[in-house]
Image (spheres, rainbow, N blue to C red):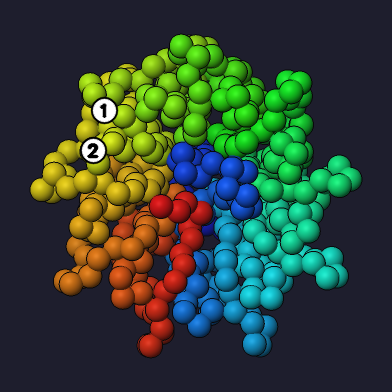
Amino acid sequence: MKLNILPLVCIAALSQASLFAVTRSTEQMVSIRDGAPHVQQFPSYGDFAAILDNGSLLSWGYSSPGGLRPTIPEGRSLVSIAANPGDMIFTGSFAGILDDGSLQCWGNSWYGGTTPKIPIGRTVVSIASALAAFAGILDDGSLQCWGMSESGGTTPKIPKGRKVVGIASTFGAFAAILDDGTLKCWGDFQNSGGFTPTIPKGKSVVSLTSSDQCFVAILNDGTLKCWGGHHELINWEPRMPDGKKVLSIAANDDSFFALLDDGTVSFWGALSGYRVAQKAQIPTGKKVSFITANRNNFVGILDDGTACSWSYNNWCSSPTSIPGYKKILSITASDYAFAAILEDKTVYCWGDSNYGGSTPKIPDGRTVISISANKSAFTAILDDGSLLCWGNRTCGGTTPIIPEGRTVIFVTGGQQG
């Protein structure tokens, strides 16, 4: 079996990072509130994959798996792609859903790059990823898992009569919300939360998110349930100030930021340094509407379109000199940088330039529709269906050539903006 190994330049770019890392924005929570299946994915270390307007695949970054182009069955087209990172030495995999609901996988076969068999008569609706495994929700609400069993790649048994409506993931486990608001967890139970916790009587789970080792669920009364690895500062249920309810949660490796129902923010974990939820500082008279995170910082979008960034000293600072004081519409994170789409559909970036923190030049007359990130780079889809990439050039930051006459409709590196 061929082992796909990351190039030294990608490993060097990630040398300041831990082996396992994940960041989540408040919009990446797995929720049952709108009735649609939601899943979480881990970002790739150095690859991107795109779907073109004819359903074909474009991939770039390190030559494997991003540079590999699987053979799509004749007459079929891609409608969705999920990624997992593998680890810092061996690359991960991609899993694509085709237009007939079947699967096409590629990349490291140990980590889910071999296409699994789907039960006869079933189709795949969505795919979640952990570090080295995938979990697919099928059209009847059942599961299909593949990849490393230690990372959640073995399909668990779901209680009879129940359906899976959403899946969150740590680096080595998955947690599924079932249609009755209960949970089913599997994977590494010792370090990654792969055991199903007890939910207090009379309560149910409405949404989930995760750090690299721990899960946190928002219950139907706005309180929390946390479980997972051994990080003593985040694996517990903090009490929110004045009985406020939690609407959504952002996460990085070792901290959680909770957006409360009054537009304030509370946080716990290594960022606070205590087993107590702290109130985050925000500008007087402002409310927070969105939060995302990279490895070092959390950033919130305020109700006036400005931003507030929190680091390990809990002071709130704004990104430096956004051109023309334009409002921020969305923010996407790589491991050590942020990229914001502004109200005029231009881009403003800050952070480590090796991770995409330098603002790229957008071609004249073009605007940005969306931004995706892997751990080391960003990719923007422009309004004409072309691409613009920046960050670590070997790990996906070099803009690929799109076949003549084709446009891009979807890109993933694992982090969506």
Where residue 310 sits in the image (x, y, percent)? Answer: 32, 27
> Front-most of 311 and 183?
183
Viewed as shown, does residue 299 lie left or right of 326? right
Q: Residues within 10 Å of mark 1 (few under 14, many from 20)?
A: few
Quadrant where the N terminus sits is bottom right
Residue 45 x/y as whole percent = 49, 53
The label on residue 304 is 2
The residue sitting at 64% across, 24% down in the picture is: 225
Separation of marks 2 and 1 at Cα, in angstroms: 8 Å
What amino acid is at disc 1?
Lys
* SS for callout 1: loop
Which of 392 and 98 lies nearest the eye of the viewer? 98
Residue named by callout 1: 286
Q: Please tell me which residue is depicted at 74% across the width and 59% down the height of the picture.
A: 138
Number of dots carrying numbers: 2
Residue at 22% in and 33% down: 318
Q: Is residue 169 left or right of residue 52?
A: right
Q: In which quarter of the image is residue 176?
A: top right
The answer to whether residue 54 is above or below residue 30 is below
